[in-house]
Image (cartoon, rainbow, N blue to C red):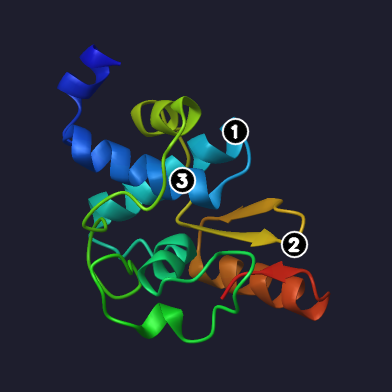
Amino acid sequence: YKAAIENSKYSIHEIITLASMIQSEGNNIDDFKKMASVFLTRLDKGMKLQSCASAYYGDKKIMGVDDFGNSYQKTNAYNTYVIPGLPVAAISNPGKDAIDAVLNPSDTDYLYFASDKAMKVYFSKTYAEHQSTVAQLKKAGNWYGS
């Protein structure tokens, strides 16, 4: 990864931090690469990353175990719903697939994603499409998110 890291506009710290979010949010290499695309595009556009995993971590809650509640509203150095850019540090120990995804993301137009209870990830290009997906998952009692 040395050459890819040296050619990246992100530092090794930033790459590992982003990979840690992807590791916590995703379930497989294909999802990791699409999530990397989403997060990198959002960073490029100056959008907040709005990662549930970072909000959980910043609120000292366990994703998938604890209720999300108002974790996304709490100001701390990890909550990407509140802070711009990346968290202050990694939120988990990323594996090589998550690191690879940051260095070699999918080429997509996606800006949003949501997961169902089986950890299937749904990617969306627009906020309206994302909201529709979330509404459908909630209606079916199958939404895994905030």
Q: Earlier in the sequence, mark 3 or mark 1?
A: 3
Q: Are marks 3 and 1 in contact (CB under 8 Å)?
A: no
> From the image, which quarter does the N terminus lie in?
top left
The residue identified by callout 3 is 22
Q: Are marks 3 and 2 in contact (CB under 8 Å)?
A: no
Amino acid carrying mark 3 in the image: Ile
The residue identified by callout 1 is 30
Q: Nearer the viewer, mark 3 or mark 1?
A: 3
Q: Nearer the viewer, mark 2 or mark 1?
A: 2
Mark-to-mark CA distance, 3 and 2:
17 Å
Tell me if mark 2 has few (under 14), some (14-19) or many (20+) residues whose alpha carbon lies within 10 angstroms of its own: few
**Residue in view at x 58 percent, y 40 percent:** 31
Q: Is residue 67 above or below residue 87?
A: below
Tell me if mark 3 has few (under 14), some (14-19) or many (20+) residues whose alpha carbon lies within 10 angstroms of its own: many
> From the image, which quarter does the C terminus lie in?
bottom right
Mark-to-mark CA distance, 2 and 1:
18 Å
Quarter of the figure with residue 128: bottom right
Amino acid carrying mark 2 in the image: Lys
Q: Earlier in the sequence, mark 3 or mark 2?
A: 3
**Residue in view at x 39 percent, y 30 percent:** 99
Q: Which mark is residue 117?
A: 2
Mark-to-mark CA distance, 3 and 1:
11 Å
Tell me if mark 1 has few (under 14), some (14-19) or many (20+) residues whose alpha carbon lies within 10 angstroms of its own: some
Q: Secondary structure at mark 2?
A: loop
Q: Earlier in the sequence, mark 2 or mark 1?
A: 1
Tell me residue 65's x, y (percent): 64, 68
Q: Choose between 1 and 93: the one closer to the eye.
A: 93
Q: Is residue 122 above or below residue 67?
A: above
Q: Choose between 22 and 60: the one closer to the eye.
A: 60
Q: Residue furthest toward the right?
A: 140
Q: Choose between 145 and 113: the one closer to the eye.
A: 145
